[in-house]
Image: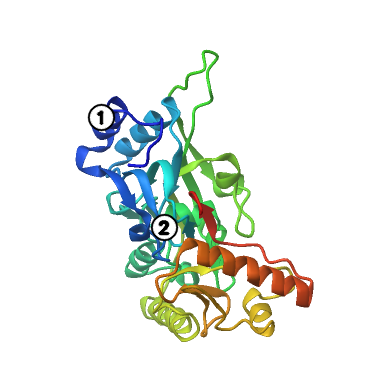
Amino acid sequence: MHENDFFNEDLLCALAGVAGEDNVLMSEPMREHTTLKIGGPADVFVTPDTEQGLVATLDTCYRCDLPLTIVGNGSDLLVGDKGIRGVVVALGEGLSDITIDGTHVTAAAGALLSDVAAAAAEACLTGMEPISGIPGSVGGACYMNAGAYGACMADVLESVRVYKPARQLDDGTRGSGNIIEFDVDELNLGYRKSRIADDGFIVLSATFNLAPGNAAMIKADMDDYRQRREDKQPLDMPSAGSTFKRPEGYFAGKLIMDAGLRGHAVGGAQVSEKHCGFIVNADHATAADVDELIRHIQATVKDQFNVDLEPEVHRVGEFL
């Protein structure tokens, strides 16, 4: 583990006690947990496999004032080459339950959006087809109001249950966090933003309100969206999805292409030849490679078109 002052045997035992001993790893390489396949080690990597274990883990981290990073499928992350100090809590397979009640689909935060859409389709429920190919978890998708093909999470969400970290008490300590359910209209969902992100909430589960549909038509639509992704996006190479948010009045990929940056590389990081809106890990790229390439793209597009590109990819951890 990276040398620091955050951890001692008692704290590690406390985390193992609430999350499960097998669910606490030391110096876990984050490249194994991001779709870019990049990232140094997390000091402590915790994968709770129940909501109760997750809440107890979060309570422990906040009470002990431990640096905390939450990750889902790692599909929108650029983790620094020096890794992440403190605790990384991963919402994964153990927190991926999906239940259906009439037209309502409820999914735990670690469920993949694609799996939720597939379950909805099997139940002949329509509404999730455009976002069915987003390679993220429910928690991450709610956090950033993920979207694709003109649709977004705000279109299908009914409510979200979140963990609200406890405020610091008068004696300098923290109590336990609160679990709160918000209706969709309370979440301030906008383009790649939400109250969840603004207020530092952690998604526990989400409920989608869908509509009855025709099974064949739902499948045909999902197949069409999947084919569009395969045709236009570099799905065969590691990436973090769209690198930049869409600037108002423009498309990031077109600006990058028109700036002559198709295929431009820094180290092992490259602007995708297939879709210039993606940076791909073409050859053992480092986070420093991606970081430098992002800055070069931003500077070039700004110089040529006077447009500011804002990264959609989230930087976390320590960079060289």
182 versus 71 height, above or below? above
The residue mark sitting in front, 1 or 2, is 2
- Between residues 193 and 9, which one lies in front from this camera angle? 9
Q: SS at mark 2?
A: loop
| Residue shown at the point (46%, 86%) measured from the top left | 231
Q: Extreme left residue here?
A: 22
Residue 47: x and y in percent read 30, 46
Tag 2: residue type? Gly
- Between residues 76 and 161, which one lies in front from this camera angle? 76
Q: SS at mark 1?
A: helix
| Residue shown at the point (43%, 47%) measured from the top left | 84
- Between residues 236 and 292, which one lies in front from this camera angle? 292
Q: Dot 1, crowdedness within 10 Å: few (<14), some or many (≥20)?
A: some
Q: Is residue 152 visible?
A: yes
Q: How many marks?
A: 2
The reply, left or right, for residue 236 in relation to residue 246 is left
Residue 261: x and y in percent read 62, 81
Q: Which label is found at residue 13?
A: 1
- Between residues 38 and 205, which one lies in front from this camera angle? 38
Q: Which residue is mark 2?
A: 39
Q: Extreme top residue here?
A: 171
132 versus 71 height, above or below? below
Tag 1: residue type? Cys
